[in-house]
Image (cartoon, rainbow, N blue to C red):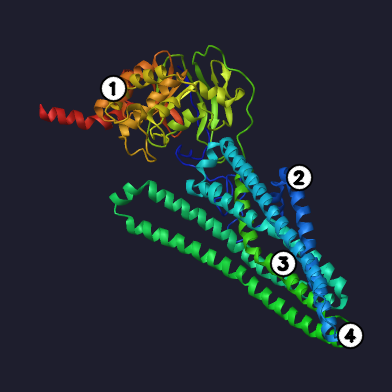
């Protein structure tokens, strides 16, 4: 192995465990590219976001056209109803008041039957349109969820490093659900109300253009009120969903760390933080609903004022002989029908503002910068496991270099241990092998092939990894082990479990390998969970093995078992072992000592102790106390 290290930048390198924030951190936990806008300080871009949201309905265009046709027919049926009923009124009025003859109930009955048919057709078509719209919305939101899920798999690790987990979960759950509810409650109603408004206005002009002009005066008043109140509520709805995400993040952190909260007696502080976030959400939500709720009473007032004016003017026209009583009756009904869709549309403003605010937060995720596209190269087969770093440069942020001009070679089958203080860059180094991050300079090769020239999936299939923090999903122990290899057989699973000493404890469980791991994996000890992840690595049969503090969670006795298992696992495999406990890497072929992103020493355990440098001081810091105790005891 050879190393060639050079740090030339005058600025101190950033620590490896420091995660930068990429781009301006704007509201809603905006992603690395700073797309966020939902801060509550700036209004949501309503029209562009609404257009983009509606674009998600484009695959459902045939069904939407069918719904529009149904709504038009239903609107026509509903709009002619008052005129028909007005004819019935005229028959009665003319017979009793003007001509003073008996009422022709057969004629009145025929007119009422026509009105009944019209209203029944209106009801059936409205119901069918609502049913189809429901299916359209659910399919559209289903596709949106799919897009978000697929997008998350394409996002780079740095995106998740810059996002609170609860905030991201809120975007892909709460915000998507809010979009669904908004479309569900408004789409059909908006179409119905718009066509109803058009139909009613047409019939109003048909009955009396004078009264129609009087009624239309309320439209600009209604639009002005809606726009004035809507602008004020936009900011508050954006702030509401931002506060929802922050509250979810705070709850998620407090819940997952509830043991530590209780150990350190921080329940009161957590409760205070929750109250503060909850109050912030309450204030934003209350303000948004209060302001947008003003629309309805204002619109009712405008509608009632319009109704009074029409009644007075219509009465004068009847006494003057300009209109029949049935026409005025029909027009008064139309005035009510005219006000209702305007009021309904205005009442939907708060739903639309809330839904578009959520849509914009989801679009921020969909617009986040993805990992660069995969190349189409191929790894050498069969893989040998020679890993080489060639003059690599890497930094989390351009202005703060972490690794500069680092070179090293790990020969096939060798074990490379990486030690150093916290933040030295140990985990960063192995993350670069996995291409969790891309280099700014140089290259890393596997068997002479640049890892950047092959698909990430092909590269990662050759690498097994066991982390300090175990990750198990809610399934059986068998399922969690089988996660390491597609199509793993029962014999392969049992062999991996035996090699990792899972078999030693699993039979003491009531259901053996079929034991279901609960959500927090609290029905297993930390050491047992770690052994399962090690068995998973055994099953994957990697060419390159990465162990990041893999034995830190197990007891001393289990550690000895794991070390034996690791010795078998490392056979004929290139292994990178990150360790703080130096007792676990004494048998490594080469030990790298890192500080501030640079390799400051390398060699075998004996060579580095003899050199009495950085490694010697680390070793002494761990074992000097134990040696002193032994000497005192002697």
Whichever of labels 2 and 1 marks the residue nearer the N terminus, that label is: 2
Residue 44 in percent (x, y) is at 65, 58
Instruction: Evaluate if marks 3 and 4 touch, with contact meaning CB atoms under 8 Å apart.
Output: no
Q: Nearer the viewer, mark 4 or mark 1?
A: 4
Residue 455 marker? none
Q: Residues within 10 Å of mark 4 (few under 14, many from 20)?
A: few
| Distance from the alpha carbon under mark 4 to that under mark 1 | 105 Å
Looking at the rendering, in which quadrant would you find the C terminus? Answer: top left
| Distance from the alpha carbon under mark 2 to that under mark 3 | 25 Å
Residue 196 in percent (x, y) is at 76, 64
| Distance from the alpha carbon under mark 2 to that under mark 1 | 64 Å
Q: Residue at x 48, y 48 (%)?
A: 166
Residue 561 marker? 1
| Residue wearing tag 4 | 321
| Distance from the alpha carbon under mark 3 to that under mark 4 | 31 Å
| Residue wearing tag 3 | 341
Instruction: Evaluate if marks 2 and 1 touch, with contact meaning CB atoms under 8 Å apart.
Output: no
Residue 62 marker? 2
Above or below: residue 120 compared with residue 303? above
Q: Nearer the viewer, mark 2 or mark 1?
A: 2
- Horizontally, residue 373 falls left or right of residue 85, namely left
Residue 368 in percent (x, y) is at 61, 43
Q: Nearer the viewer, residue 595 or 226?
A: 226
Q: SS of the residue at dot 4?
A: loop
């Amino acid at each position: 192995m050879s190393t060639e290290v050079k740090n030339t930048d005058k600025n101190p390198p950033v620590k490896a465990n420091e995660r930068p924030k990429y781009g301006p951190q704007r509201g809603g936990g905006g992603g690395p590219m700073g797309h966020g806008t939902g801060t509550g300080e700036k209004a949501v871009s309503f029209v562009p976001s609404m257009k983009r949201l509606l674009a998600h309905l484009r695959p459902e265009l045939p069904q939407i056209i069918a719904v529009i046709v149904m709504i038009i027919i239903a609107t026509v049926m509903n709009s002619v109803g008052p005129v028909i009923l007005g004819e019935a009124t005229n028959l009665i009025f003319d017979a009793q008041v003007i001509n003073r003859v008996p009422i022709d109930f057969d004629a009145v009955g025929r007119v009422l039957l026509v009105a009944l048919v019209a209203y029944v057709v209106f009801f059936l078509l409205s119901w069918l349109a609502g049913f189809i719209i429901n299916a359209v919305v659910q399919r559209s939101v289903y596709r949106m969820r799919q897009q978000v899920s697929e997008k998350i798999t394409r996002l780079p690790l740095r995106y998740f490093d810059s996002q609170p987990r609860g905030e991201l979960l809120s975007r892909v759950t709460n915000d998507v659900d809010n979009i669904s509810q908004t479309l569900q409650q408004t789409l059909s109603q908006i179409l119905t109300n718009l066509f109803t408004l058009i139909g009613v206005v047409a019939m109003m002009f048909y009955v009396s253009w004078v009264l129609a002009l009087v009624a239309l005066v309320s439209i600009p008043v209604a639009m002005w009120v809606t726009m004035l109140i809507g602008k004020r509520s936009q900011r508050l709805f954006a702030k509401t969903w931002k506060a929802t995400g922050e509250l979810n993040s705070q709850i998620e952190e407090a819940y997952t760390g509830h043991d530590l909260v209780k150990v350190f007696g921080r329940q009161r502080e957590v409760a205070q933080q929750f109250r503060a976030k909850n109050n912030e959400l309450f204030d934003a939500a209350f303000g948004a609903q209060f302001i947008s709720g003003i629309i309805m009473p204002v619109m009712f007032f405008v509608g009632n004022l319009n109704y009074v004016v029409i009644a007075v003017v219509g009465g004068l026209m009847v006494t003057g002989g300009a209109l029949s009583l049935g026409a005025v009756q029909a027009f008064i009904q139309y005035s009510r029908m005219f006000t209702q869709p305007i009021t309904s549309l205005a009442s939907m403003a708060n739903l639309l503002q809330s839904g578009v605010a959520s849509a914009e937060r989801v679009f921020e995720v969909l617009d986040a910068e993805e990992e660069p596209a995969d190349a189409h190269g191929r790894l050498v087969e069969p893989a040998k496991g020679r890993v080489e770093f060639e003059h690599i440069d890497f930094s989390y942020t351009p202005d703060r270099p972490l690794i500069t001009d680092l070179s090293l070679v790990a020969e096939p089958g060798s074990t490379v241990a990486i030690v150093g203080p916290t933040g030295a860059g140990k985990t960063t180094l192995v993350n670069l092998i996995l291409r969790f991050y891309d280099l700014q300079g140089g290259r890393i090769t596997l068997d002479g092939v640049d890892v950047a020239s092959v698909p990430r999936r092909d590269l990662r299939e050759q690498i097994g990894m066991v982390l300090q923090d175990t990750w198990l999903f809610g399934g059986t122990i068998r399922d969690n082990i089988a996660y390491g290899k597609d199509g793993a057989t029962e014999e392969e699973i049992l062999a991996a479990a035996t090699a990792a000493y899972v078999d030693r404890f699993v039979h003491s469980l009531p259901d053996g390998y079929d034991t279901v791991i609960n959500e927090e994996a609290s029905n297993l000890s930390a050491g047992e969970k770690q052994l399962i992840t090690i068995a998973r690595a055994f099953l994957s049969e990697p060419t390159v093995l990465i162990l990041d503090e893999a034995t830190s969670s197990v007891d001393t006795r289990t550690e000895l078992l794991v070390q034996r298992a690791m010795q078998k696992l490392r056979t004929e495999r290139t292994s990178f072992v990150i360790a703080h406990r130096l007792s676990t890497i004494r048998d490594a072929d080469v030990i790298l000592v890192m500080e501030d992103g640079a390799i400051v020493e390398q060699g075998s355990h004996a060579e580095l102790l003899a050199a009495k440098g950085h490694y010697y001081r680390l070793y002494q810091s761990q074992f000097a106390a134990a040696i002193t105790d032994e000497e005192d005891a002697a």
